[in-house]
Amino acid sequence: MSPVDRRRFLKGSLATLGAGGAGAAVALGSNASAHASAASPDLSTESLRVDQRELMVRYPFDGEHQAGILTPRQLQAAMVSLDSIAQTPTQLFLGLQQLSVRIRQLTQGTSVGVEEIDDPPPDSGILGPYDAPDSLTVTLAFGATLFDHRYGLASKKPRHLTAMRAFPLDRLDPSRTGGDLLVQVCAGQRDTVVHTVRELMRVMAGTFTPRWSLDGFQAAQRNANPHASTRNLFAFRDGTANPDVTDDALMRQLVWADADEPAFASGGTYMVVRAIRQHVEFWDRVGMLEQEQMIGRYRVSGAPLGGTTEFENPDYPEDPEGKRIPLNAHIRLANPRTAQTAEQRILRRPYNYNRGFDEAGDQDQGMLFVAFNQDPKRQFEQIQLRLESEPMTDYITPVGGGYFFAPRGAASPADWVGSGLARA
Amino acid sequence: MSESPSSSPALPRATGPGGVRPRRPGRIVIWLGAVVLLAVAALVAAAVIPGSHHPVGDDAVAQRAVAAPTPSRDGPVRVKKVFDSSISAKRYGTQVAQMENGYNASGPVSDLSPLPVSAFDRPVAVYRRYAERWAARLGHDVVPLTVALRAGNRGLARRDWATAFSDYLHLGAVYGLLPSDLNNDLAGMPGEIGDPHFIGLHRIEMGLWTNQPVTSLAPLGAKLSSAVQRLRAELPSTAVDPRSSRVRLARGLVAVTVDPLDFTLRIHEILEDAQRDFMSGLDVPWSGAGVLATAAGVAATKELLSTVKPIMAGRGDAYGTSEYWLHRLGRVFDSIRRRDGGYPSLHQLTPDQLELIDGTLAGTLTALEQVPGTLETKTFTTFPKIPQGEATTK
């Protein structure tokens, strides 16, 4: 393609995108794939090509709640925690405002645009001339430290927001813990996530500076049953007992901030993020029986021990002494399914992570645990305290993370996430 | 370090350096039987389901599942069928669903008859005497450390600290059994900055390697001495109960017991912990004494394994394989030990030395994982069923 052709191509696509949005973009996509298949119709090309329809899936950015909370878990994620270096509240608010503007563009799909030839392009361009939405969601959440003396935000602080508590078996690395602002990026493709972080860092430069980050991925759904939960790095199905996100009343009860919170908090939720190292070599040395008893489920089917199917009720009242499912099995401690523990349930949205190898040559893998709840003390911490006595603690080490508050979504394209901080 | 296989005392027949990962004896035969019974469906499971543990035939099967029937040099080829079956590849996801959903077998039971719990009486007793000897040695070696701390001699104190730390880690299987406050007083790590309960060997380590005045550490030396005395007083109370054959470590009203499973798990857990906490530098952040600490773990593991040698006889090759790898690992540490008997710190290791330790340690742990299954004391039958009709689905 000559430079002239390329420019015309770009212009053309910009025009159609402006007019037709996603539909036009699909046309663009199929155009591109037609080229590819004409050139080399072999399997290697075919298998590398992304389903264009998937790239065009879009979640709204504006709304009562932020996307990326109840949204079905995308395959790829990055969690970036940053500290604010804004000198004044105004700088902070401007930074957040710019962040929302850019997130809105990227999540809704945007053309890369052109600048004068001697200027740096406004977009890195690594996704090509059009940033397809690709199910992208970017969720912003604030750490307790943002509400300290610096910006006069103490009165806005959500009631239950604190620094993450260190549990007895945690080995938290301060350089992987906490932060003023958490940016959760989730999308279908890895390059979409990488591109998004890269573009957002440009917007945030000078206002927010990175503290820690962690990349996550979800297991591919290999089971034709779309409801089957995918596996974590211990090979067990994860998320089976998650509350139903389509149940609004339940979400108001378990996820969204209570009415007795400051006005800023309404429509928001508390986000617990934990980097939990899973010692996979250790786990792989454990007998199958012991693995299943530690979890309380069969590894292959995910059914509770003694059951047949994944979503079967483990029926604890029938097994009071733990003969079938040990009393300290993970599923039993995490969710005892009693009337008293019903209000402790959390909405989990975890990812797996893989950070290569550690100093001793073991694989540095684990869970990027993400949970949304209405009150971490009432919910996440009660669960976590019970889990301190599970035998699985020998195979995991929480190393980082933090508590954050994800405020309500932007009301309209004129609004921004966190605008409640700036209101009197 | 290069080492010829012939230099090892018990090189197992099937396994050499870099050889095939050992498997529980008999497992493969039983597995094959099970696979045949489950017919085509089970074949799919073995290849595609992570839940089919101890995959049979390993790489050969796995590769057949994904590779083309005829190898091609021109790149990937679409698999039309799930390997060796009539199942269309298009139905892969459906087949996975059929295999996973409702597949609740946990694998065949061991072909080894379970050991009576009493078989562990002697190993536990032998190990207890070993631990007592090392506790006594620790009691002896902590004296010069306290003297060096009082005298303010950092060089001597560091050397004596290393000796005491190594002694303590030679206890190996015992440390998990001690009351947690005694464990903490001996070698606890700090919970948070300024933790007042942070007083043991690691507290002294911090002082000695962070330029705190050495004499200021003298009170910590005295506290360590009394903790060691308490250790020596409590260890002999570890008594073998002839009826239950369980080790009982009585302390007031608290009785800590260890069952045979825990005892056998420690045979690989000591080195797993050493790898995670010491070779990573996590638990020796000031001295970097990860090599010294891991070498002590090797010694403890060798002793522990030798206590169960009599009851592992005739139960497959797990003992021979483990002994071979522990010997090989011991040789690695011998080759790295300095002339004065000490070990280089983690950051003094050359990249080659670090790779040799990490790699041999990983090989050793892979061999040791076979030990607990070989020493099983129970026969697993099946999980009780959830009563039908009661259960509800979501």
Image (tube, rainbow, N blue to C red):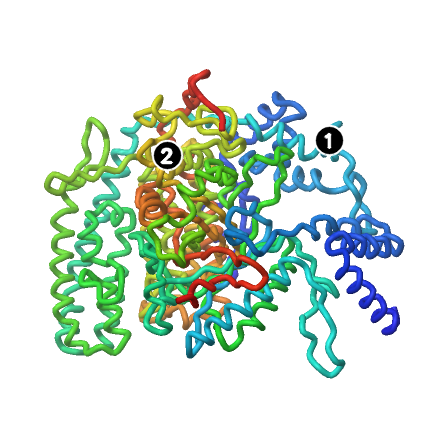
Residue B213: quadrant of the picture:
bottom left
Q: Secondary structure at mark 1?
A: loop
Question: Mark 1 or mark 2, which is nearer to you?
Answer: 2
Chain ID for label 1?
Answer: B
Chain ID for label 2?
Answer: A
Locate residue B279, reporting x and y percent.
40, 61
Whether residue B309 is visible, yes or no, is no
B385 or A214: which is nearer to us?
Answer: A214
- Residue displayed at 13% across by 43% down: B251
Q: Which residue is mark 1?
A: B84
Label 1 – label 2 distance at C-alpha: 40 Å
Locate residue B242, reporting x and y percent.
19, 29
Q: Secondary structure at mark 2?
A: helix
Is the same chain shared between marks 1 and 2?
no
- Residue displayed at 69% across by 38% down: B65
Residue sitting farthest toward the bottom: A118
- Residue displayed at 65% across by 26% down: B41
How packed mark 2 is, by other alpha carbons closer than 10 Å (few <14, some 14-19, many 20 or more), is many
Residue A228: quadrant of the picture:
top right
Q: Is residue B283 above or below residue B67?
A: below
User: Which residue type does callout 2 highlight?
Assistant: Arg
**Which of the labelled discs sits on residue B287, or is there none?**
none
Locate residue A315, reporting x and y percent.
39, 25
How packed mark 1 is, by other alpha carbons closer than 10 Å (few <14, some 14-19, many 20 or more), is few
**Left or right of A390 in this view: A204:** right
User: Which residue type does callout 1 highlight?
Assistant: Asp
Q: Which residue is mark 2?
A: A332
Q: Is residue B386 above or below residue B149?
A: above
**Left or right of B361 in this view: A55:** right
Whether residue A136 is visible, yes or no, is yes
Q: Is residue A63 above or below residue B57?
A: below
